[in-house]
Amino acid sequence: MKTTTPAILAALLLIGAGGFMAGRISSSGAAADEGARDGRAARVSGQAAGGGERNAGASRRAERPERPARAATASSAERLSRLETIVRGEDPLDRNRALLAFIDQLAPGDFEEAIAHFRSLGITESRLGEYAMLFSAWAKADPLAALSYAKENTSGRFATDTILTTWAAIDPDAALRWAEASHTGDGANPYLAGIIRSLAGSDPQRATQLLAAMPLSKERGEALDAMLPHLLAKGNDATKTWIAALADDSLRNGAMLRAAKQLAQNDPAGTAAWLLENPGEATQRRMDDVYSAWAGKDQQAALASLAALPAGENRSNALRGVVTSVAVNNPKAALSLMDRFPNDVNDRVVQNFIWHSFGTDTPAAVGQIARIADAGSREQMYRRAVGRWLETDAAAATAWMQSNPLPPSVVKYLQNRQAQRP
């Protein structure tokens, strides 16, 4: 099989690392264990994929002349040794160039052995890009064999998502038939995320239909995560229009929640207005992110907008965002903002100030813990912040504690913690 370099690279563009990480294999150790399993994976029946849709890979394998067993063994050993040398390399550019050349020389029947050997090396977690390249190439040569192997030998969905993303770019109908035939039970189909990721760029209308038909579930959230990067690439207005058209309230809110932080990078003012015009969970959870991004770009404009908001949760959330942005570099200025809007300062505003100013001005950060109204949250913050301070600068922390009385339970906790340290 000859798989051209542009073809593999094009397939890889469909595979986002962020989207797949939810389905990544559990650990490199687990990958090594799974990679050592004996036996070839059971092949999915032709009926499960829509009858005679197995591609020409099987016939090409059948036409290859048989080699003497000893020669074949030597060739296989050499090939696997070369693969190991490639993937253990430290230069990512060299690795990818060499791996593409290696893949171009593989016949469809060589992929299972190559991937099993790759996984047995125990470096899968640190070489996920190369792992995806191998499965993507196998999906182009024989998607059914690749999926059968992935189902039999992998515990997460990284491999199956990669294969389905590649296959759906070539033959979405066949990929969908396989996904539908392979899913059992009443829950959401876990195989759709990879297909939606592929269709989002080439056929967004169909991808949206598949997404909207999924029930509320973790799988639908993953499919939405796969869809959004393609929408965001079209611009803020196109993304908002797509979200507004979603009929399912929960799906629409989930899309807003995911998109708002990204939209704010280019247009924080417009994103803030959009959230305020569409109140809900996304507004409650993303106002601080939007105003934090806004303050980073134009602090005066963000403050002017904050001051114009009516008193309430939205204004407190907006203040939290501005304080977060300012506290990282200028804790004193952030404190001035909190004093300027005292009625909008709640426990979450104070907590954000503490954690974001701790590395710049630890005494100022710890000094605000007393402003936390909830006693349980206040004591927990003392334990965490002062405990951390004792680890980094015990003399300064001890001096502060001597001048600032703490709850007896906190003092006891910190004393026990210090006593246990070497």
Image (spheres, rainbow, N blue to C red):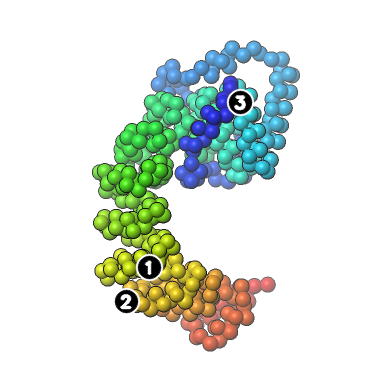
Q: Is residue 105 above or below residue 303?
A: above
Q: Earlier in the sequence, mark 2 or mark 1?
A: 1
Q: CA distance from mark 2 to mark 1?
A: 20 Å
Residue 374, given in percent of the width and then of the height, sits at: 38, 75
Q: Which residue is mark 2?
A: 343
Seen at 53% across and 75% down, the residue is 361
Q: Which residue is mark 3?
A: 104
Seen at 62% across and 36% down, the residue is 96
Q: Quadrant of residue 35?
A: top right
Q: Quadrant of residue 106?
A: top right
Q: Is residue 36 visible?
A: no
Looking at the image, do the residues carrying marks 1 and 3 touch, with CB atoms under 8 Å apart?
no
Q: Secondary structure at mark 3?
A: helix
Residue 74, given in percent of the width and then of the height, sits at: 74, 23
Seen at 33% across and 38% down, the residue is 208
Amino acid at pointer 3: Asp
